[in-house]
C-alpha cells in the first residue's frame, strides 16, 4: 500500500486541537487495512517529521434511528492518534 493511500484525512475537532496543543498529537482517519508501521512510515514520508508513537482506534458502525425506526447506517472508520517527537509539528491550516 502506498503512503498516500494510508492517510485518508486529518480529523479536526476540539478534542484533536487540544491534543495537538497540549501533547503534540495529531489525529488522522486512516485506511481500514493499515497497521501501525504503515501509518508511521506514511506520516514520516509525507510530512517529514519524526513519529514517536501510534495508537489506533476502530470506530464501529452505528445505526441511525429516527422515531424508533432504523433509517440508515453511519459507517465505521479507523482513527490513528500519532504522537510526534519534541520539536516537530504538522500544521493543517497555515496562513488562515
Image (spheres, grey):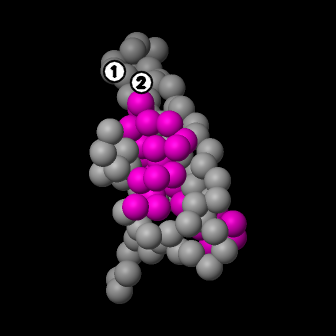
Q: Nearer the viewer, residue 10 or 44?
A: 44
**Furthest residue toward top:** 69
Tell me, yes or no, whether the two marked residues, 1 and 2, touch with CB atoms within 8 Å: yes
Q: Quadrant of residue 55?
A: top right
In the image, residue 25 lies in the stretch drawn in magenta: yes
Q: Is residue 46 left or right of residue 54?
A: left
Q: Which quarter of the figure is the N terminus placed in?
A: top left
What span is in magenta?
Answer: 17-45
Q: Does 74 sit left or right of 27 as displayed? A: left
The residue depicted at 37 percent of the width and 63 percent of the height is 46
**N-terminal-most mark, 1 or 2:** 2
On the image, the x and y values in percent for residue 12 come to: 46, 59
Under tag 1, what secondary structure? strand
Near-viewer residue (82 or 68): 82
Q: Which quadrant of the view contains residue 92?
A: bottom left
Q: Position of residue 8 (x, y in %)?
A: 34, 47
Does residue 6 appear in the picture of this structure? yes
Quickly name the residue at label 1: 72
Identify the residue at the far bottom of this view: 95
Residue 60 position (above or below residue 38): above
Query: Which residue does the numbered mark 2 point to in the structure image?
Result: 64
Label tally: 2
Point out which mark residue 41 bears.
none
Look at the picture and state if 19 lies above or below 58.
Answer: below
- Say which of 39 and 64 sits in front: 39
> Relative to the observer, which residue lies in front, 75 or 55?
55
Q: Residue at x 44, y 70 (%)?
A: 48
Q: Residue at x 69, y 70 (%)?
A: 22
Q: Is residue 84 magenta?
A: no
Residue positioned 64% across, 53% down in the render: 53
When the figure is inspected, residue 55 is found, relative to residue 27, above or below; the finding is above
Can you say which quadrant of the picture contains the C terminus? bottom left
Amino acid at each position: 500500500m502506498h503512503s498516500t493511500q494510508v492517510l485518508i484525512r486529518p480529523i479536526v475537532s476540539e478534542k484533536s486541537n487540544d491534543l495537538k496543543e497540549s501533547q503534540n498529537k495529531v489525529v488522522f482517519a486512516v485506511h481500514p487495512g493499515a497497521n501501525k508501521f504503515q501509518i508511521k512510515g506514511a506520516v514520516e514520508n509525507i510530512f517529514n517529521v519524526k513519529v514517536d508513537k501510534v495508537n489506533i482506534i476502530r470506530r464501529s458502525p452505528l445505526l441511525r434511528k429516527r422515531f424508533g425506526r432504523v433509517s440508515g447506517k453511519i459507517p465505521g472508520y479507523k482513527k490513528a492518534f500519532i504522537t510526534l517527537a519534541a520539536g516537530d509539528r504538522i500544521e493543517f491550516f497555515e496562513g488562515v
